[in-house]
Image (cartoon, coloured by chain):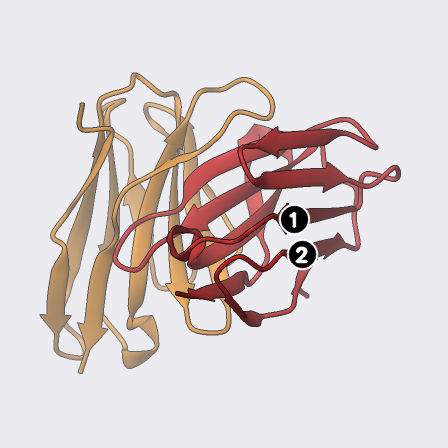
Chain colours: A red, B orange
Amino acid sequence: TQLLEQSPQFLSIQEGENLTVYCNSSSVFSSLQWYRQEPGEGPVLLVTVVTGGEVKKLKRLTFQFGDARKDSSLHITAAQPGDTGLYLCAGASGNNRLAFGKGNQVVVIP
Amino acid sequence: NAGVTQTPKFRVLKTGQSMTLLCAQDMNHEYMYWYRQDPGMGLRLIHYSVGEGTTAKGEVPDGYNVSRLKKQNFLLGLESAAPSQTSVYFCASSSPYSNQPQHFGDGTRLSIL
């Protein structure tokens, strides 16, 4: 059973457009973490959200954690080709174990 | 500033062969993890360790064994490789405090023929 559902699985947009991807959980986790993974590399942490309703910004990326702490969204403003990658959300539980979603593959076309 | 280093980066095995994947971290992290990543399946936890000399099963442990003899190293073993174990394997480490990020290596691409 996939605890974390990410949608859409694949998204292709033109440079300069905005996009939003979603991560929905069937469980409440102590935190949700967003990672970005590029081909041939391991995932790299972008942000951790802990508190329900929390909003965090990382340059043109805005992360939101739902009030019930079961869903999260990532919004990218004015996407750049460098934003291309696989975005993974992960829910944290005991011993810092992470349960990952399948990812949102984002392609930004120049 | 190496972080998490995985060796080898690529390997091709025949069915039934054995091998060990090595993960080394230089961040003095207590916790270490092994994942496999398959198309359409995301990252799945195989085994993890919360300290030297301790290991525990994750979501998909069958067919794998692990050892954590030294704090900085976490080994993943395949005793008798099967084609279903063809995957990209990632090692990660983290500090023991809540909600800490995991730091990943760049993966080992393993093909079982």
The residue identified by callout 1 is A75
Quarter of the rendering occupied by the N terminus of chain B? top left
Mark 1 chain: A
Residue B85: x and y in percent read: 31, 71
Amino acid type at image mark 2: Thr
Name the element at disc 1: strand
Looking at the image, residue A79 lies above or below residue A68: below
Looking at the image, residue A107 lies above or below residue A93: below
Mark 2 chain: A
Most distant residue in the bottom direction: B113
Q: Residue at x 18, y 28 (%)?
A: B2
Q: Pointers 2 and 1 in contact (CB under 8 A)?
A: yes
Residue A72: x and y in percent read: 73, 46
Q: Nearer the viewer, residue B31 or A80?
A: A80
Q: Is residue B61 visible?
A: no
Looking at the image, residue B79 lies above or below residue A47: below
